[in-house]
Structures are given as structure tokens and as C-alpha cells.
Image (cartoon, rainbow, N blue to C red):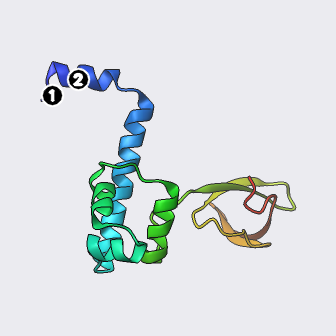
Amino acid sequence: MRSNIAKQILQETPEETKIFVTMYADILVRIKQLMKEKKMTQKSLAEKLDKQPSEINKWLSGKHNLTLKSIAKMQTQFTEPIFYVPMTSRVESKDEYKSHFTVYRNKPIPKNIQFKDFALSGSVSKTYQPVANGDC
């Protein structure tokens, strides 16, 4: 059970601080997961990034703020995304049906998108045209 002081501190913590801490922790967990998968140590990552091991240690212990540039440099070494930025795109069909879906790879949307509409009477295959190609 949390103490009253801890509850009060949490209540007074700004929402953006809570979001920042959660996001930062998620990114660190992902980086450490990728390091483990790629069999990288902090020292080997530091060498590949032309950084001191102490700087990598600060990044991964939360003692120094990660920049998007440093995350991008790490991602080039992992050859896998550290995090995804979902993009919502709107598509329209000839029958003016409008829908939204999320794209997780930030790649251009194909010109014709095929998927099925499921109804109680069966499924109907439709082709949809993107309204915007990732510029939503």
C-alpha cells in the first residue's frame, strides 16, 4: 500500500512528466532488448557509435537525456526500429465509404489497398484508394 506522501507526490506530478518517464523507460527497455538480441555490450555499442562507454552508461541508466539523434544513431547499429510512430491515414472507396487505419512502418501507402469487409451475410472484397499518402 502506498503511503500518503507517495500518493500526494503522484497527484501533484504533472501529466507530461508521467508520460515522459513512461516513454523514456519504454525506450530504454527496448534498447536493452535490442542489445541483448544483437549480443552487444555497452562497450561495443560505444565503439560503434564513437562514444565513450561512460556516455552510453549515462544514456542507459537514465542519467542523461537521450536525443532523437542519439536514438537514430543507435538504431542504425541495431538495424531494427527502437520505437514506432503510428500514422493514421484515411482511405475512400468508390461507394464513398470512409475508414481510418494505422500505419506502423511510416512507409508510403500502396495505391490500391485490398481487404475484406466482413458482414453477417459474408465477406466482400473492396479496393480502396488512399486520400493522402502518409501526409495526414
Q: At x 57% / y 63%, what residue is drawn?
A: 104
Circle 1/circle 2 CB separation < 8 Å: yes
Position above or below: 65 against 132: above
Residue appearing at x 41%, y 72% in the figure: 50
Q: Is label 2 in a helix, a strand or a loop?
A: helix
Looking at the image, residue 80 sits to the left or right of residue 52; the answer is right
The image quarter in which residue 107 lies:
bottom right
Numbered badge on residue 28: none
- As rendered, which of 74 and 98 lies closer to the eye? 74
Residue placed under numbered mark 1 in the picture: 2
Q: Quadrant of the N terminus?
A: top left
Residue drawn at (79%, 54%) of the image: 97
Residue 7 got which mark? Answer: 2
Instruction: Tell me which amino acid carries mark 2.
Output: Lys
Vertically, is 78 above or below 2?
A: below
Counting from the top left corner in percent of width and height, residue 126 is at 76, 69
Q: What's the residue at 28%, 80% (across, down)? A: 39
